[in-house]
Image (spheres, rainbow, N blue to C red):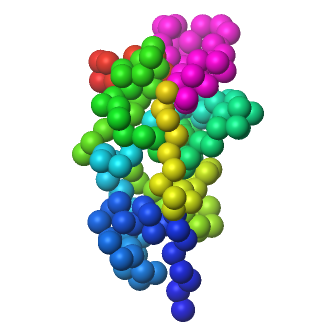
C-alpha cells in the first residue's frame, strides 16, 4: 500500500497539472525528480549555498518564514511570490530567478532525502511563499565578500556572496 501524499506534495502536484493527485497518479510516479512549472503562482530565486544559509539564519532570527527551500547541491532554490520577471527587478539586482516557462526539478516533499536534491524547508501545502524583497534584504544584510583574489584572477561573483546582475549577460 502506498502512503498518502503530504499536503506539500499535493500542492506541487496540483501546480504540475494533477488536479486530484494520488499516491499512484502524481508527478513523481515515474521519476523521483518531478518537473514542476514555474510561473503563474510562484517563481524561483536561486542563491549560492553559503549566502543562502546565512540569509535563512537571518530570516529565522527576524521571525520570517522562508517558505519552501530546495537544496540542489551548491544552490538553494527559494519558492517566492511570482511578481518578478527576473532578478534585475529586485533592488540591487542581486538575484537570479526562475522565469515563466521554466521548470523546477524537485523530489517529492515528505520523502526521505536520498538524492542530491532535497527540501531544506519542504512546502507545507498552504501555498505560503517568501516575499523576494525580504530575501534580497537578508542577502544584503548578511553578504560577506571573500578575501583574496578569485581563482581565475577576475572579480566575478563568487559562491560566498549573492550573485550580482545575475542573468544580465546570460
Name, please, the residue furthest toward the left.
101
Q: x and y percent of residue 23 in the render?
A: 46, 81
Rendered view: 147 above or below 87: above
Q: x and y percent of residue 64 in the render?
A: 64, 38
- Is 6 magenta? The answer is no
Rendered view: 15 above or below 130: below
Name, please, the residue furthest toward the right.
61
In the image, taking residue 126 as reference, residue 148 lies left or right, namely: right
Front residue of 76 and 153: 76
Q: Is residue 116 visible?
A: no
Q: x and y percent of residue 160 in the render?
A: 61, 23
Residue depicted at 32% across the width and 53% down the height: 37
* Total tally of numbered discs in the picture: 0
- Is 136 magenta? The answer is yes
Q: Is residue 86 visible?
A: yes
Q: Quadrant of residue 83?
A: top left
Residue depicted at 46% across the width and 20% down the height: 94
Residue depicted at 37% across the width and 40% down the height: 82
Rendered view: 81 above or below 8: above
User: What residue range appears in magenta?
Assistant: 134-162
Task: Give the main secondary structure, helix, strand or loop, of the magenta stretch.
Answer: loop
Q: Quadrant of residue 17?
A: bottom left
Front residue of 13 and 129: 129
Question: Split into 4 quadrants, where in the image is the C terminus?
Answer: top left
Q: x and y percent of residue 5 in the render?
A: 51, 75
Amino acid at each position: 500500500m502506498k502512503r498518502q501524499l503530504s499536503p506539500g506534495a499535493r500542492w506541487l502536484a496540483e501546480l504540475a497539472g494533477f488536479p486530484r493527485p494520488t499516491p499512484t497518479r502524481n508527478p513523481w510516479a515515474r521519476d523521483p525528480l518531478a518537473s514542476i512549472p514555474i510561473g503563474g503562482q510562484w517563481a524561483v530565486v536561486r542563491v549560492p549555498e553559503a549566502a543562502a544559509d546565512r540569509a535563512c539564519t537571518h530570516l529565522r532570527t527576524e521571525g520570517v518564514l522562508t517558505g519552501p527551500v530546495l537544496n540542489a547541491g551548491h544552490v538553494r532554490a527559494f519558492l517566492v511570490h511570482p511578481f518578478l520577471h527576473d532578478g534585475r527587478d529586485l533592488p540591487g539586482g542581486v538575484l537570479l530567478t526562475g522565469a515563466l516557462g521554466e521548470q523546477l526539478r524537485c523530489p517529492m516533499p515528505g520523502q526521505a532525502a536520498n538524492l542530491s536534491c532535497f527540501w531544506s524547508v519542504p512546502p507545507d501545502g498552504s501555498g505560503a511563499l517568501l516575499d523576494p524583497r525580504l530575501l534580497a534584504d537578508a542577502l544584503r544584510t548578511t553578504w560577506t565578500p571573500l578575501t583574496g583574489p578569485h581563482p581565475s584572477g577576475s572579480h566575478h561573483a563568487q559562491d560566498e556572496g549573492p550573485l550580482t546582475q545575475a542573468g544580465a549577460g546570460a
